[in-house]
Amino acid sequence: MNILKSLLASAVVAAGLGTSASAEIKLGLDSANYEPFYSRGADGEWTGWEIEIGNALCAAMEEDCTWVPIAWDGIIPALTAKKIDAIVGSMSITEERQKTISFSDKYYNTPAALIAAKTSDITSVADLAGKNIGVQVSTTHENYVNANFADGSNVKIYQDFNEHNFDLVAGRVDAVVADSLALSPFLQSSDGSAFEVKMNLKDDAIFGIGVGAGIRKEDTDLLAKFNAAIAKIRADGTYDAISAKYFDFDIYGG
């Protein structure tokens, strides 16, 4: 009987080890489309530059991964609650976020911008007095607007990156602050053709030093894997080959 119990216990342990080894890494990203980085098609499949980069990182780590969409303002809580294993969704590396989670090395860096109608008189911060500015919740862009424009302007917060673009077209906001590259498809669309970049915005203390994968602080082994994978795809040409399909400039940044 003791031998049987021992064999059963060994089988349970072995099964547990097998399950752990085959577990997928859950990559979290915003549930709203954020082109050209990621968007979800009618078939439910995610496509875009960051999806391809994330898949390449998983291949370099020799890990199976799955994408998990989560509302942006809940994505860090989802990570700390272990509902996902990493955030690979255009999250900037900032000191404030690093109080809660760790970040991999950066895998891209693009500036923020303020856009408005081509016919508007907005050319400087002074021109924003009394204007309505749209920005997405829980982003570095929201932090920047609150720190620099909130006193003289009306700040409108949106759950979805695309929502403030819709309101800009509808005239419910006068300007939008967001990532310049993410705004590019909108500005090139028929709806966005009447708008342009009025100001490029820079503040390393708020915007951080680039975008990295968000990892739980205790998951040091996974962090090391991500850093090694980023270095690998940068060195072997995978990163550049993927980027060339989407951009005609160096998205990695200085």
Image (tube, rainbow, N blue to C red):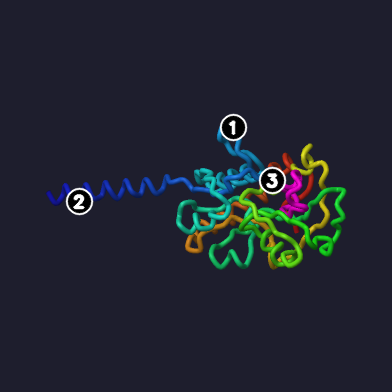
Q: Which x, y percent locates residue 30?
A: 59, 48
Which amino acid type corresponds to the residue marked 3 in the rendered image? Gly
Q: Distance between the residues labelled 2 and 3?
A: 51 Å
Which is more N-terminal, label 3 or label 2?
2
Q: Which residue lies under the disc numbered 2? A: 6
Q: Which residue lies under the disc numbered 3? A: 237
Which is more N-terminal, label 1 or label 2?
2
Q: Which x, y percent locates residue 198?
A: 83, 54
Which amino acid type corresponds to the residue marked 2 in the rendered image? Ser
Q: Residue at x 74, y 51 (%)?
A: 173
Q: Which residue lies under the disc numbered 1? A: 42
Q: Which x, y percent locates residue 46?
A: 59, 39
Residue 180 among those drawn in magenta: yes
Q: How far apart are marks 2 and 1 (CA)?
A: 51 Å
Crowd class of label 3 (few under 14; some 14 to 19; many from 20; radius 10 Å):
few
Apparent side of residue 122 relative to residue 144 in the rendered image (left or right)? right
Q: Which x, y percent locates residue 5?
A: 17, 49
Residue 190 among those drawn in magenta: no
Q: Which of 39 and 226 is in front in this view?
A: 39
Classify residue 93 by image quadrant.
bottom right
Q: Which residue is drawn at 81% across and 63% down?
A: 125
Secondary element type, mark 1: loop
Residues in magenta?
Answer: 167-184
Secondary element type, mark 2: helix
Classify residue 156 by image quadrant.
bottom right
Which amino acid type corresponds to the residue marked 1 in the rendered image? Ala
Q: How many labels does the image show?
A: 3
Apparent side of residue 109 relative to residue 125 in the rendered image (left or right)? left
Closer mark to the observer between disc 2 and disc 1? 1
